[in-house]
Amino acid sequence: MVSPAYENNLVLTWFREHLYRRHQRFKCNRCYKLFKEHKELEKHQRSKTPCPLREVEPPMDPSEGFTEAQSKLLKSRKQGKRADVNKKTEVERWYDMYCILFCLDPTSPELPSSPCKWSLP
């Protein structure tokens, strides 16, 4: 029999992998266009005709995915670079991920009242 803590950890791991496979986006630093694949961004950057330089980065809609900067924040929590990460419950880690993905402060009233209930596919 699998312990609930182990099963919850598997669900968080699966969810994190799903995020990287399906929702991570790569952003051009000149025009701020988003790409689903890093190869597409590289092709864009190596184009003979450079993209227009935009002075102001438009806000990103979270439904479009998440950026490399957000990915680094998610990974820093995953790899335990923060001293308190191993002390957090699955619910606290879920809220951490939610705040990163939706650019929210942990005290924001926009946070859901309870975490999503997941089950592995």
Image (cartoon, grey):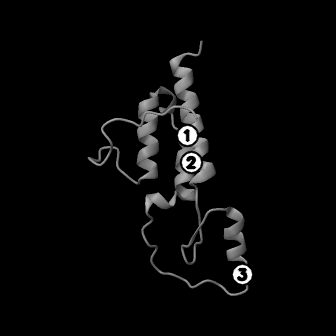
Name the residue at 43% across, 63% down: 61
The residue carrying pointer 3 sits among few (fewer than 14), some (14 to 19) or many (20 or more) residues within 10 Å by Cα, namely few
Any mark on residue 61, and which? none
At numbered mark 1, what does the secondary structure look like: helix, strand or loop? helix
- The percent coordinates of residue 17 (x first, y second) are 61, 43
Above or below 49: residue 11? above
Q: Is residue 59 left or right of residue 114?
A: right
- Total numbered labels placed on residues in the image: 3
- For marks 1 and 3, the one nearer the N-term is 1
Is the residue under label 1 in contact with that under label 2 (CB below 8 Å)? yes
Element assignment for label 3: loop
- Asked if 10 appears above or below 24 in the picture, the reply is above
Residue under label 1, please give it.
Answer: 15
In this view, the mark in front (2 or 3): 2
Within the image, what quadrant is residue 39 found in? bottom right
Which residue corresponds to the image point at 45% horizontal and 37% vertical from the top-left? 94
Per the image, the residue denoted by label 2 is 19
* SS for callout 2: helix
Q: Sequence order check: which comes first, mark 2 or mark 3? A: 2
Numbered label attached to residue 47: 3
Q: Amino acid at mark 2?
A: Leu
Residue extending farthest to the bottom is 49
Looking at the image, do the residues carrying marks 2 and 3 touch, with CB atoms under 8 Å apart? Answer: no
x, y percent for residue 68: 58, 58
Labels 1 and 3 touching (C-beta < 8 A): no
Q: Is residue 3 above or below residue 61?
A: above
Q: Amino acid at mark 3?
A: Ser
Q: Nearer the viewer, mark 1 or mark 3?
A: 1
Q: Is residue 117 visible?
A: yes
Where residue 40 appears, as percent x and y from the top left, is 69, 68
Outermost residue toward the left in this view? 109
